[in-house]
Structure formats: structure tokens, C-alpha cells
Image: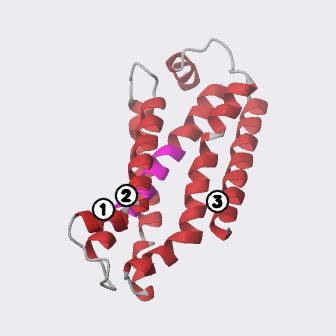
Amino acid sequence: MEVETANKDIGATQPSPLIKIGLVASIVAVVQFGWALQLSLLTPYVQLLGIPHTWAAFIWLCGPISGMLVQPIVGYYSDQSTYRFGRRRPFIAAGAGFVVIAVFLIGYAADLSHLFGDRVDKPTRPRAIAFFVVGFWVLDVSNNMLQGPCRALLADLSWNDQKRMRTSNAFFSFFMAIGNVLGYTAGFI
């Protein structure tokens, strides 16, 4: 009964074509790219802003905390939603929008802090650190906001077809790997 409801919510009368499933699964490549880039670049960037190495570890607490809180909450509300654009798509779109905001805050933390009064010649720039930390946490929260509904949309698109579900999960894992490889490579270069 739940599968029939889920299928009606996505407006499908049969399982979606594999190309559509592949396109939805490709969203996770961007999420994983962002996480891999965080892991490879952001601790050195934090130290450039003046945060001591020992304090940088506290910033990384966001990942586990947001994963533990955000994904279940977003999952619950996306399961219950009756939005005109579908149950999952509004959450995916909102997560993507927050990723853009977070990348802007992280990338321009030093410039924004200078605009708001931080001096460039000081070794520690508190406003830059604040912009960076807010951007970092928004990025983690939005990545978690994207990943759960994306995987749930794949399940919706697969219907109750076990073979198609296995294929969807394979696409999802493949694009996770692609995102990781590209993110760590970008961080290395």
C-alpha cells in the first residue's frame, strides 16, 4: 500500500527509465565532492584564518551531529509532505540552495570579514572565522539535507522492483565514488 502511494506521489505509472534514475543518483556526486573537498582543504584554510589546529577539530563535530539530527528530521518531513512538486524535490532543491550559500560563505570568508572590519595584517581574524564556521556548518547540514531525500527519491522511482532498486543503489554508490575521487583530487592539486 505504501509503495502505491509513493508511486502516485511521483506521478509515475511504471518504473522510471534508468537514465532518470542515473540523473537523480548523480546528485550525490556533488555532495560527495563537497565533503571530500572539506576533508582535504578546509583544515589548512581554517589555520590561515587564525584558528589553532587544536580548535579545528571542534569545527568537524558538525558532520556527525548534523548527520544524526538532520537526515532523520528531513526524512520524516519528506515522507509526510504533499508538495505540488513531489515529496522529495523541494528538500533537494532547498539543500542545493543552502550549498550555494555555504560555498559562498566559505570561499569569501576572508573578503567578507575584511568588509565588516577585520584587519588583514592581524594573524587572527574573528569575523572571517565566524563566516567560515557558519558556512562550514551550513554546508554539512545542507549536504545531509540533500542526501536522504535523494536516496528516498531513488527508491520512489524504482517502485517495488528489486532489480531496479539494486541498480539505483549501484548508481548511487558509483556517483559517491566519483564525487570522492574528484573532491580529493581537487584538494590535492
Q: Earlier in the sequence, mark 2 or mark 1?
A: 2
Magenta residues (range): 133-147
Q: Which secondary structure, mark 1?
A: helix
Q: Which secondary structure, mark 2?
A: helix
Give the residue displayed 44% in from the left and 54% down from the top. 103
The residues bearing labels 2 and 1 have C-alpha atoms spaced at a distance of 8 Å
Q: Which secondary structure, mark 3?
A: helix
The residues bearing labels 2 and 3 have C-alpha atoms spaced at a distance of 19 Å
Mark seen at residue 105? 2
Look at the image and tell me in which quarter the N terminus lies. Answer: top right
Q: Is 153 one of the magenta-colored residues? A: no
Question: Residue 160, can we see it?
Answer: no
**In terms of secondary structure, what is the magenta stretch mainly?**
helix
Q: Position of residue 77 (x, y in %)?
A: 38, 37
- Say few, some or many: other residues with alpha carbon within 10 Å of mark 3 (under 14 / 14 to 19 / 20 or more): many
Q: In this image, 170 relative to 34: left or right?
A: right
Q: Position of residue 87 (x, y in %)?
A: 45, 28
Q: Position of residue 141 (x, y in %)?
A: 41, 54
Mark seen at residue 183? 3
- Say few, some or many: other residues with alpha carbon within 10 Å of mark 1 (under 14 / 14 to 19 / 20 or more): some
Residues marked 2 and 1 touching at CB (< 8 Å): yes
Mark seen at residue 112? 1
The residues bearing labels 3 and 1 have C-alpha atoms spaced at a distance of 25 Å
Dividing the picture into quadrants, the one containing residue 81 is: top left
Give the residue displayed 24% in from the left and 73% down from the top. 118
Q: Nearer the viewer, mark 3 or mark 1?
A: 1
Q: Nearer the viewer, residue 10 or 55?
A: 55
Q: Earlier in the sequence, mark 2 or mark 3?
A: 2
Q: Nearer the viewer, residue 44 or 112?
A: 112
Q: Nearer the viewer, mark 2 or mark 1?
A: 1
**View extreme (left): residue:** 117
